[in-house]
């Protein structure tokens, strides 16, 4: 197995990295394609599906500097995300070899003409299912996309399985419902068939992903039912990508608690610790409800690590409201925070709200929250020192003193350990120690 050709990032982090590894199925003589993926995990899954089609058509995945075609899968959740997407498109269009740049994703869906104007070789294809055909056309008539169903090992140590798309929450700061439309679920038989293929291929961890995962509904099968069914495929570890607080129902918590494959880690967005700010955001909960659901989650899964999103400087946010967010995060004791400054996205209600918080103050509040995040991460590690954990190996490197494996534990700690033998995708048992440079040091058992 190899790392994905689709670079990944969360909406909170908004970072991206070029692909660095190639699938063993790539033919050296194949036509060269590169991927740049921004935004959420769903975008990453969709980029991977496009790449599977192109690999089947004889393409090979390369660095941008070698590519005849660069596929840019965009995000548009905030103005900052728009800026990063446009920057990535311009960068690709200006590469010395003058590649064709095929742009897809949420920004492409909302602003086709503006994206096309970014370069003479920029091609927009908002329909992600048609991207592979568009790339094939750009590369030449001999390239024909193959079906996107996986038939061999995935590109990740863990496999992300998209089960839902779209959202109708219409939070005041978010443009995604306009870009992706309302909730739509992948039929349960299709999800199960793909999960079974992944397990058969040797995948040890499946991550169920969606834009609004809690809205999954396939002919009456909801998210709790989906978790139960996928767990019965025999997958060793099963993880949820993100879950809204109101979707932490008693039924879901019961299924998670009774499912041995469940990873004791959940990402539950908070956004703000102030009820007034949550109301302005059009979030559908207040702090008493949020904290009650977190308490129920911890009762069901006592070892759970909880991460969250928090936004700094939403319009009209006062100093007291910002302090309420900081205090709520301290009180709840998250394992980590994904902190991002509010960035006005044109077309959203929040962009037109009065009393926008000055950029400098937004940055200051975000920095304070990031300091809290570092402290919380360290505290989470301290609580785990000396404990046994299962490590999903995501990278193996050769060092002067032998092999060194890095990956993630069930509760999503980044861990590294020396070992005599390890391979990507393998799950190994380790004893956790302290952290160095953001990675927890461990001893293999």
Image (cartoon, grey):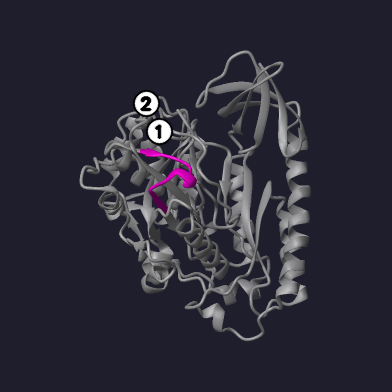
Q: Regarding mark 2 in the picture, which secondary structure is present there?
A: loop
Is residue 63 highlighted in magenta? yes
Q: Which residue is disc 2 drawn over? A: 201
Where is residue 224 drawn, in percent x and y?
Answer: 41, 45
Q: Find residue 326 and report its image quarter.
A: bottom right
Left or right, residue 45 beside residue 396: left
* Marker count (numbered): 2
Q: Quadrant of the C terminus?
A: top right
Compared across the picture, whether 356 is left or right of 81 comes to right
Please report the residue visible at 55 percent of the width from the left and 67 percent of the height from the top. 83
Q: Is residue 270 left or right of residue 435?
A: left
Q: Quadrant of residue 290?
A: bottom right
Task: Quickly name the residue at label 1.
Answer: 154
| Residue nearest the observer in this picture, 264 or 171 | 171
Q: Residue at x 64, y 27 (%)?
A: 389
Nearest to the eye among marks 2 and 1: give it. Answer: 1
| Element carrying mark 1 | loop
Whether the magenta-drawn stretch holds residue 151 is answered as no
* 21 sits to left or right of 185: right
Residue at the location (74% across, 59% down)?
369
Pointer 2 with pointer 1, Cβ within 8 A: yes
Residue 211 is at least partly visible in this image: no
Separation of disc 2 and disc 1 at Cα? 8 Å
Q: Which residues are magenta?
A: 60-71
Q: Is residue 145 above or below residue 72?
A: above
- Residue 368's place in the image compared with 220, above or below, is below
Name the spot of residue 23 as percent of width and height, x first. Answer: 41, 32
- The percent position of residue 324, horizontal first and vertical second, equals 74, 67
């Amino acid at each position: 197995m190899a790392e994905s050709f689709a670079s990944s990032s969360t909406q909170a982090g908004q970072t991206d990295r070029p692909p660095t590894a190639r699938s063993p199925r790539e033919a050296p003589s194949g036509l060269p394609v590169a991927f740049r993926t921004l935004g959420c995990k769903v975008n990453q899954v969709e980029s991977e599906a496009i790449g599977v089609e192109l690999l089947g058509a004889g393409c090979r995945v390369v660095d941008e500097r070698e590519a005849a075609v660069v596929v840019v899968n965009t995000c548009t959740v905030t103005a900052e995300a728009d800026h990063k997407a446009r920057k990535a498109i311009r960068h690709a269009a200006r590469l010395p070899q003058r590649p064709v740049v095929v742009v897809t994703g949420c920004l492409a869906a909302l602003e086709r003409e503006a994206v096309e104007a970014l370069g003479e070789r920029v091609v927009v294809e908002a329909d992600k299912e048609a991207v592979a055909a568009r790339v094939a056309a750009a590369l030449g008539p001999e390239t024909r996309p193959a079906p996107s169903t996986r038939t061999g090992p995935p590109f990740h140590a863990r496999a992300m399985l998209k089960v839902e798309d779209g959202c109708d929450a219409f939070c005041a700061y978010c443009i995604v419902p306009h870009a992706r439309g309302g909730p739509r679920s992948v039929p349960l038989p299709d999800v199960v068939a793909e999960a079974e293929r992944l397990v058969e291929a040797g995948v040890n961890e499946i991550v169920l992903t969606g834009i609004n995962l809690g809205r999954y509904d396939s002919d009456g099968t909801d998210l709790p039912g989906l978790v139960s069914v996928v767990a019965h495929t025999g997958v060793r570890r099963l993880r949820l990508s993100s879950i809204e607080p109101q979707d932490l129902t008693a039924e879901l918590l019961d299924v998670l608690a009774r499912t041995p494959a469940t990873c004791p880690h959940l990402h539950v967005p908070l956004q703000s610790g102030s009820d007034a700010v949550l109301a302005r955001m059009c979030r559908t909960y207040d702090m008493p409800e949020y904290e009650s659901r977190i308490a129920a989650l911890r009762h069901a899964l006592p070892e759970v690590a909880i991460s969250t999103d928090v936004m700094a400087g939403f319009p009209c946010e006062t100093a007291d409201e910002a302090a309420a967010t900081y205090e709520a995060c301290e009180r709840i004791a998250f394992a980590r925070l994904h902190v991002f400054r509010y960035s006005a996205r044109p077309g959203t209600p929040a962009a037109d709200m009065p009393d926008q918080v000055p950029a400098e103050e937004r940055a200051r509040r975000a920095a304070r929250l990031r300091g809290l995040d570092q402290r919380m991460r360290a505290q989470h590690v301290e609580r785990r020192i000396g404990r046994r954990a299962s490590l999903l190996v995501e990278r193996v490197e050769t060092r002067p003193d032998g092999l060194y494996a890095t990956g993630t534990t069930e509760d999503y700690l980044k861990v590294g350990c020396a070992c005599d033998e390890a391979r990507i995708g393998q799950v190994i048992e380790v004893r956790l120690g302290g952290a160095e440079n953001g990675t927890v040091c461990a001893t293999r058992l």
